[in-house]
Structures are given as C-alpha cells and as structure tokens.
Image (tube, rainbow, N blue to C red):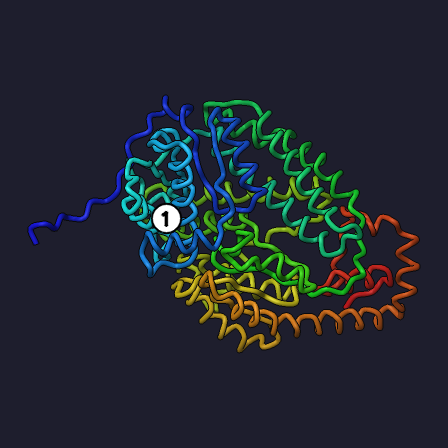
C-alpha cells in the first residue's frame, strides 16, 4: 500500500501564445476534405498544422492495448491513431524532439457520452508509452469545463475552421450525389479534389484579423468564400452523370465520429454502400454546430427570469444559428443549390419530442431521432443507417427511442449498426438485409413514377437527350415526392408528382 500514489490527472506543459508558431498542431477525426481545409485555416492564422493519417485497424488494436479496454471504438481508434503517429515520430527522430515540436488538439465535452473522457484515454496511452512530455490540448465545445491548459485561439483560426467545415460539408454532399451516377469512373473524385484545393486556397489567402469585431464583419460580409465555391462548382459541373440509374438512397446517422469519418472506424460504410449500388446521403458536421446552438438556446430559455442575462444570451445564440445557416446556404447556392439543405432544428426537435426529450444532451440527443423521422416524412431517403459504437449509452438511448418511432412509422427502413471496429461481417450483413428491401422500394418507386407520367424508360431517355443540362453535375434534381433520384427525374420529365 505504501507504493501506491494518488491519481494525478494529466496536465500538459503550458504553450505560450508566443510559442505557438514554433510547433505543429496535430488533429484528426473528420473527413479528408474538412481536414485539408482546416490545415489551410491554421496556415492563414500563421500556425503550422498537420492532419493525422486516416485511422486503421492497427490503430484500433494499439488503442485497446494502451488505454481502457472498456472504451468505445471511436476512443480506441483516435487514441491508437495518435499513439502510432508518436511511435513513428520517435523512431524517425531518435530523440524526444517531437514532444517539443508537436502538440495534439482535439474537442472536449462532458455529459453521459464517453467523449468527455477521451482525454483520459490519451493520457493513459501517453503514460504507457513513456511520453508524458507530449502535450494535448482541448477545445471544450460545451464551455463548462474550461481549464488553464485549454487553448484559447483567436478569431482568425476559429472562424477559418467554421468556414472550412461548411465548405467541406457542401462539397462532400455534392460529391456523394454525383459519384453513383457518373458516366466516367473517377470523374467525381477528381472534381472533389480540385474543389478542395480551391477551398484551401481561399482560406490561405483570406484577410488577417486579430480582433473579433473586424474578423466577424469581414467573414460575414465578404464574397471571398462564395467566389471560391463558384470556382469549385465548375469542376463538378463538368462531371457527366446518368441519373436514370435506379439506386436506393441511404441516410447516414449515428454517433458523431462514426457517421462522419470515412474509413476503417465505420467499416468503410460509405464506399461499401456505394459498391452495393446505393446513393449515400452523408452526415454534415455543420448540422452538429447548428444543434449545439439550438441546445444552448434551450438552456438559456429555461433560465430566463431566473438567471441574469439569460434572455440576451438566448437571443445571441439564435442570431448565431441564423448566421450559420445563412452562410451554409450561400455555399450551397454557389454549388447550384444542389447540396441538401439543413433540416430546421425546431422541426427535428418537434418530430422527436414524443420519443426523446430535447433536454437529454448525450451524443446527438434528440436530433438523431428527429433526422430519421424527417428523412422518412419528407422522402429524403429510402433507408436510415445508424452507426453506433458498441455499448454507447447515448446511442443506445436513441436506438431504444427508435423502437417507439417504428411502432408509429413501421414503414421506415432502419438499420442500426453497433460498431465494434472489428466485426464488419456481422454489421455489414445486417445492413445488407435492410438494403435489399431499400433496393426493392427504389425500383417500385421508379415504376410508380413511370406509371404516373405514362413514360417508358426509352421515351424518358429521349426526353432527357433533348435536355442536356440534366446530364451535368450541377443540375439540381427537383423533388417531386419521391426519395430516389431516378424517380424524381422521371417525374420531372413527365410533369407529375407522386
């Protein structure tokens, strides 16, 4: 007992503002589009940044070796991803200089989700690697757990990250709409890469500001980013597509990390669904930012009349949410308004309210349930694929709430996949069973569209040939009451609705 010491929480060595230009900030966990754009946002702020490699199965194994075995797979992936990077750096440099020259930045939070404990897994991994001198800093998204070691970045970087995320989301959405229908394989991927380069250049060449007032005024009034998105739009518009291919549309929901990342952590679900003949409706990070502001508004509304300035704070969050949506819509319009619009938070809350309380904040809260119902009622998708970490409490609550939703809407095709990181055969087999039914519904919907218009497929192709704009990437498919792209195209050609 005398050899035992009290637990000592990890506290990184301080990083003075004057030293920030001398280190490289490591980060990860988003799509490659957003991460490249965020690198450019760091550069524009006069800082060096480097995104970590895409997580692999080896990272999962390393994370389980070094940290708590009871953690969810996103924790294991991100912990192992960082640890393997540090091991490679130590081997390459042969000394401890990497611990001085690099720092890791990530999001922090609190609540029922183990996301609030990620940093403890990092700390345990560092101790087990003998790398306690390496520094990890948190962006506390909740604002409730502010610590001395949390980094306080200025407006240049924070606004840059926000715009990077919005532009990357719009590009990703358009990319996933086009790739299943492209005539020339690989054309959409090349267009997306060129578009991201335009985004990065726009972020690197934006004006520099040190004060919040002038930084906000410029970022919210400039046409700098919209012009970059218009340049990006030209690459997508040159992608030739055949939208009469009948494909089921699958909406991705779930835990933030698993629904966002593209790769091993979620069994490459996005590319797998496309290989199985589906069109993927990806999850946007921007709607998460929108949800955080909506939740903050709810909290302030509950305090009005009890806590000073709560009403003013609520109105401030409401204004911020309107500004966010306006900025994202400007990015969508620059891409021909083809990327999907963001659902209204008030509608998501109201749809979910009979099944999930809006004040339960773990994970995505009621938004996950609301998005599933919204997608069904508005015919945005044939199927919902929810990605949940194994034993994740917030998502377990959401899956439980969805039982009530399915009782009310039994026609929803819902595939909740519990992701462990190394059980893809089970998860993908389960998804494939639901996807088979989604394919049948997409085909039936397409046949119903043909019947409603009196067209044959041959006649539809003749009509499409007379409208060459319909084969261009930026042509926006009108929504005529069908979930599938091909069915809506038929309805547009025949002037009908389902």
Is residue 496 visible to us here?
A: yes
Q: Position of residue 277 (x, y in %)?
A: 70, 63
Query: Which quadrant of the structure image shows residue 330?
Result: top right
Closer to the camera in the image, 420 or 148: 420
Q: Residue at x 74, y 60 (%)?
A: 485
In-image side of 308 versus 35 (left or right): left
In the displayed structure image, the side of residue 376 where residue 42 appears, left or right: left
x, y percent for residue 125 = 32, 47
Within 10 Å of the Cα at label 1, are there few (<14), some (14-19), or many (20+) other Cα atoms? Answer: many
Location of the C terminus (image quadrant): bottom right
Q: Residue at x 28, y 39 (%)?
A: 132
Q: Position of residue 387 (x, y in %)?
A: 51, 62
Marker count (numbered): 1
* One can see residue 107 in this view: no
Task: Identify the residue position indicated by label 1 in the image.
Answer: 109
The image quarter containing residue 72 is bottom left
**Residue shown at the point (53%, 68%) measured from the top left:** 425
The image quadrant that residue 219 belongs to is top right
**Residue 312 point in image, percent of width and height:** 41, 41
């Amino acid at each position: 007992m005398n050899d035992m010491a009290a637990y000592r929480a990890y506290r990184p060595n301080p990083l003075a503002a004057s030293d920030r230009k001398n280190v490289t900030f490591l980060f990860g966990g988003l799509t490659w589009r957003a991460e490249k754009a965020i690198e450019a946002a760091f550069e524009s702020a006069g800082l060096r940044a480097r995104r970590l490699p895409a997580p692999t199965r080896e990272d999962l194994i390393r994370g389980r070796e070094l940290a708590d075995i009871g953690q969810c797979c996103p924790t294991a992936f991100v912990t192992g991803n960082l640890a393997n990077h540090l091991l490679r750096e130590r081997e390459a440099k042969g000394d401890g200089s990497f611990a001085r020259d690099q720092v890791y930045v990530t999001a922090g939070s609190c609540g029922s989700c183990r996301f609030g404990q990620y940093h403890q897994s990092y700390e345990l991994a560092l101790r087990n690697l003998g790398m306690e001198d390496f520094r990890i800093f948190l962006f506390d998204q909740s604002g409730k757990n502010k610590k001395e070691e949390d980094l306080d970045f200025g407006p240049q970087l924070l606004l840059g990250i926000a715009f990077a995320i919005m532009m990357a989301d719009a590009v990703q959405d358009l990319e996933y709409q086009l790739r299943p229908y492209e005539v020339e394989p690989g054309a959409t991927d090349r267009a997306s890469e060129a578009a991201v380069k335009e985004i990065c250049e726009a972020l690197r060449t934006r004006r520099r500001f040190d004060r919040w007032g002038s930084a906000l005024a410029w970022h919210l009034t400039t046409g700098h980013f919209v012009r970059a998105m218009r340049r990006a739009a030209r690459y997508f518009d040159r992608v030739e597509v055949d939208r009469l291919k009948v494909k089921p549309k699958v909406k991705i929901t779930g835990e933030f990390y698993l629904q966002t990342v593209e790769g091993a952590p979620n069994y490459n679900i996005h590319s797998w669904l496309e290989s199985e003949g589906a069109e993927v409706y990806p999850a946007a990070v921007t709607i998460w930012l929108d949800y955080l502001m909506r939740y903050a508004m709810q909290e302030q509304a509950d305090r009005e009349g009890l806590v000073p300035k709560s009403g003013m704070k609520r109105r401030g969050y409401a204004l911020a949410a309107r500004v966010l949506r306006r900025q994202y819509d400007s990015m969508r319009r620059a891409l021909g308004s083809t990327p999907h619009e963001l659902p209204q938070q008030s509608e998501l809350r109201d749809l979910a309210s009979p099944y999930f309380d809006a004040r339960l904040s773990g994970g995505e809260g009621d938004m996950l349930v609301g998005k599933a119902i919204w997608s069904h009622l508005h015919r945005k998708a044939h199927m919902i694929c929810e990605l949940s970490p194994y034993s994740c409490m917030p998502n377990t609550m959401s899956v439980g709430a969805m039982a009530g939703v399915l009782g009310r809407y039994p026609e929803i095709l819902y595939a909740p996949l519990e992701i462990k990181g190394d059980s893809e055969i089970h998860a993908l087999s389960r998804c494939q069973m639901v996807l088979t039914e989604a394919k049948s519904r997409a085909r039936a919907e397409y046949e119903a569209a043909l019947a409603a218009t009196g067209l044959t497929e041959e006649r539809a192709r003749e009509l499409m040939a007379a409208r060459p704009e319909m084969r261009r990437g930026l042509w926006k498919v009108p929504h005529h009451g069908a979930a599938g792209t091909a069915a809506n195209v038929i309805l547009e050609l025949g002037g009908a609705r389902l």
